[in-house]
């Protein structure tokens, strides 16, 4: 544990995912890894999540407590029960709120491509229960760090709900993190009573958004500080093009908005020890990577050719640029490359990708499942990794890729712009070159970037330089955790 310059802070995370217990994307990774990193710096951290039936109780032995949490949602008084478990490889307690009717479901937020119709009810209960937990447990935090729309109501509920007069509530500062502005938690105004909030908050200065309820907006207007997950994204979301209708508020609150790049969990993503890999490797001993490559080709049913093997692990969502990839495929499939895709999501992309995989069985492998082991195997075995995102708040896979010596090909947006330095003669000379980036969201730009990567891949000494530059990067959470502490301190100074 590091020595603290200031007294430790008490920090409560409220979020709907926490890796490794449960995740659907980057949000879960951040909640799990940042909470651990803050605890490692000596702070007292707890994490509150819903107890989904999808959490594996054998791997994560949750223990029931006597604590019961109740919250009024619409006309109902809903009761939940607190279970606890320690976050693996840490001393961070996870408080999991059990409410079978709301959280024993097939998916986290929906199933078969559509959201659950009672999501407002589910997450209003969760947010209120998190505050109730504070009140009952006596774990009075200096900072309540709230993540994404699913937990955002907790901010408004704290400042405008039953607890607002309590000394612990007045002392707590609220930090709200936007992991992805595109997901705002929009609901019809008829459901307002489910929020547990007073009627005066349904208005333009409150949570109203073009006649609907906007949970994320509630987080933006009631928190003391706002963060998002990369400096470039923090700028982008203040523009009408990328602000998803909330750019005005974000510009108004720009003095409270900070972009902090996510780190990655370097224990979980370590090519020296990764239990999912066929062989281990490091920057100095890369022989294992060739074994991983071969194992990946076998696993994906691709012939063992020396072609450049490109990995993609993404949600199949518009954000991730699959429309570009699908349009570029006819050209790409004529190059000496293979592509291994892992992803779940929009049916339209699933269908099209499957059809294309049938058309190019020796060149395109499509795996439509959520499979953490395969995600690791793709990072370990691929030569390069493609992320042609339309927008990308931070992105984690490009950082995993670099740690695994897998050269990223990315669109230059958001966190991808902040983490991947394009290869040019200059960046190669000063050893900052990490991969290949392209700017216009167009098929020719994507194809050109892949062709540039391919040309370098066919020049092994230069490719090796890129691999070495990539594997030398430090994407651990330490630095980001310090940046969050600064935000917490600023929020405290503001509230004092
Ligand atoms: P986002 O949060 O927008 O989904 P990120 O790149 O920030 O994107 O994080 C995605 C995370 O989810 C990564 O850890 C990635 O490996 C993982 N992931 C996404 N899809 C899958 C899948 N089908 N199987 C396994 N892991 C996945």
Image: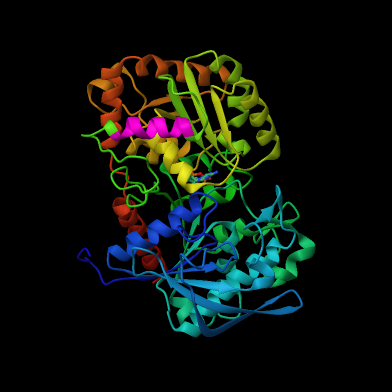
Q: Residue 332 at x, y = what percent?
A: 54, 17
**Is residue 284 positioned above or below 192 on the image?**
above
Q: Which residues are magenta?
A: 288-298
Residue 313 left/right relative to 193: left
Q: Is residue 327 above or below residue 244?
A: above
Quadrant location of the C terminus in the rendered image = bottom left
User: Residue drawn at (26%, 30%), measured in percent from left and top?
Assistant: 468
Q: Which image quarter holds the N terminus?
A: bottom left
Specify the quadrant of the image occupied by residue 417.
top left
Q: Position of residue 110 (x, y in %)?
A: 68, 55
Can residue 6 be seen in this snapshot? yes
Task: State whether the magenta stretch is mostly helix, strand or loop.
Answer: helix
Seen from the viewer's position, the closer of residues 197 and 14 is 14
Residue name at image x 26 percent, y 32 percent: 286
Residue situated in front as seen by the camera: 37 or 233: 37
Q: Residue furthest bottom?
A: 66
Q: Is residue 197 visible?
A: no
- Residue 268 on image: x %, y %: 37, 51
* Residue 242 inside the magenta-drawn segment: no
In the depicted structure, whether residue 286 falls above or below residue 334: below
Residue at x 50%, y 53% (from the top left corner): 27
Tell whether 427 sits left or right of 359: left
Residue in the picture at 31% in, 15% down:
459
From the top left corner, tell me how far across and down residue 38 is, in percent: 33, 62
Q: Quadrant of residue 129?
A: bottom right
Exactly how many numbered labels are in the figure?
Answer: 0
């Amino acid at each position: 544990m590091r020595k603290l310059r200031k007294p430790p802070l008490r920090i409560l995370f409220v979020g709907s995912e926490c890796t490794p217990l449960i995740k659907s994307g980057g949000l879960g990774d951040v909640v799990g890894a940042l909470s651990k990193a803050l605890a490692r710096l000596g702070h007292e951290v707890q994490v509150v999540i819903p107890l989904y039936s999808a959490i594996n109780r054998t791997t994560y032995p949750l223990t029931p407590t006597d604590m019961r949490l109740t919250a009024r949602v619409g006309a109902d008084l809903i009761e939940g029960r607190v279970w606890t478990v320690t976050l693996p490889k840490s001393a961070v307690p996870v408080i999991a709120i059990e409410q079978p009717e709301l959280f024993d479901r097939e998916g986290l937020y929906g199933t078969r491509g559509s959201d659950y119709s009672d999501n407002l009810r589910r997450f209003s209960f969760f947010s209120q229960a998190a505050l109730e937990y504070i009140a009952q447990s006596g774990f009075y935090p200096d900072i309540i760090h709230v993540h994404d729309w699913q937990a955002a109501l907790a901010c408004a509920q704290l400042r405008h709900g039953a607890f607002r007069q309590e000394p612990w509530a007045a002392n707590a500062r609220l930090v709200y993190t936007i992991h992805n502005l595109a997901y705002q938690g929009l609901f019809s105004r008829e459901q307002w009573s489910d929020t547990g909030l007073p009627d005066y908050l349904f208005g333009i200065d409150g949570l109203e958004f073009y006649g609907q309820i906007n949970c994320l907006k509630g987080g933006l207007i009631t928190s003391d500080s706002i963060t998002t997950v990369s400096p470039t994204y923090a700028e982008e979301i203040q523009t009408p093009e990328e602000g998803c209708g909330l750019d005005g508020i974000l510009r108004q609150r720009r003095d409270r908005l900070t972009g902090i790049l996510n780190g990655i969990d370097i224990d979980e993503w370590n090519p020296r020890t990764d239990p999912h890999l066929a062989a281990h490797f490091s920057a100095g001993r890369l022989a294992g990577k060739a074994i991983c490559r071969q194992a990946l080709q076998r696993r994906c049913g691709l012939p063992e050719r020396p072609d450049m093997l490109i990995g993609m692990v993404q949600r199949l969502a518009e954000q991730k640029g699959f429309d570009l990839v699908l349009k570029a495929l006819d050209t790409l499939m004529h190059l000496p490359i293979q592509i291994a895709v892992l992803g779940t999501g929009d049916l339209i992309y699933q269908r099209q990708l499957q059809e294309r995989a049938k058309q190019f069985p020796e060149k395109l492998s499509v795996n439509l499942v959520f499979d953490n082991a395969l995600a690791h195997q793709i990072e370990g075995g691929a030569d390069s990794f493609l992320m042609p995102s339309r927008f990308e708040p931070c992105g984690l896979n490009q950082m995993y890729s670099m740690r695994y010596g897998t050269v990223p090909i990315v669109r230059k947006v958001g966190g991808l712009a902040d983490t991947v330095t394009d290869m040019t003669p200059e960046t190669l000379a000063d050893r900052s070159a990490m991969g290949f980036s392209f700017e216009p969201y167009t098929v020719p730009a994507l194809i050109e970037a892949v062709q540039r990567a391919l040309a370098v891949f066919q020049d092994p000494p230069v490719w090796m330089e890129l691999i070495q530059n990539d594997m030398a990067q430090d994407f651990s959470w330490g630095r980001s955790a310090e940046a969050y502490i600064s935000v917490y301190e600023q929020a405290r100074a503001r509230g004092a």
